[in-house]
Image (cartoon, rainbow, N blue to C red):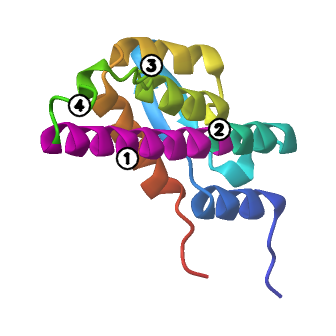
Amino acid sequence: MATFTLDDIRDAADKQFASLDIPLSGDRILRLRNPLRLTSEERAELTAVQTAGSKERERIKALAAEYRTAVEAHEADPENAPDPGTLNLPEVDQFGQLAKILTVVANDRTLCQELLNQLGGDVTLIATVVQQYNKVVEPGEA
C-alpha cells in the first residue's frame, strides 16, 4: 500500500505551484508566491491591481492613438492643426504598476520594498523580475 503523507502533499504543492525566491543581504529570502498560494484576500487584491493595470493600458493605447492622429493631422496641415507637442499626455508609472504586483505576491512586504529600493526605479530591472516570476508560476501541464 502506498502512503502519501501531509509532508508529501506539501512538497508536491511546492513543486507544482512554485514561488520565485530572491536572495537578499543577510541571508534573507524574498519569496514571490504563486497566486494560487495567496490567501483569498490577497488574490482579490492582486485581481484589483491587475484590473487597474489593464484599464491603464487601455487608456495609454487611446492616448497613443490620439497622439498619432494629432501627428498625422499636423504633418498634413501644419498651419491649421495643433502641434502634437502641446498635447497634455500624462506620464505612466510603469515601475509603480509592476511594484504593486510584486508587493501583493511577496511573502514579506518589507523585504519586497527593500528589493524595490535596490532596483532604484529602473523599469528594465523590475520587468526582468516580473518576467522571471511569470515563468516560474506559469501553470505546467497536467
Where's residue 39, x and y in %? 82, 42
- Counting residues from the start of the chain, the first of labels 2 and 1 encountered is 2
In magenta segment, residue 133: no
Q: Which residue is mark 3?
A: 115
> Label 2 is placed on what type of residue?
Ala
Depth check: give the residue in front, 91 or 140. 91
Where's residue 122, x and y in %? 30, 22
- Secondary structure beneath disc 4? loop
Q: Which residue is mark 1?
A: 65
- Counting residues from the start of the chain, the first of labels 4 and 1 encountered is 1
Q: Which residues are magenta?
A: 51-76
- How packed mark 2 is, by other alpha carbons closer than 10 Å (few <14, some 14-19, many 20 or more), is few
Instruction: Look at the picture and state if 120 lies above or below 5.
Output: above
Instruction: Look at the picture and state if 72 lies above or below 79.
Output: below
Evaluate if marks 4 and 1 touch, with contact meaning CB atoms under 8 Å apart.
Answer: no
Q: Which one is in front in this view, the residue at disc 2 or the one at disc 1?
A: 1
- Counting residues from the start of the chain, the first of labels 3 and 1 encountered is 1
Q: Residue sitting at 54 percent across and 21 percent down?
A: 112
- Secondary structure beneath disc 2? helix
Gap between marks 2 and 1 measured at Cα: 20 Å
Evaluate if marks 3 and 2 touch, with contact meaning CB atoms under 8 Å apart.
Answer: no
Magenta span dominant secondary structure: helix
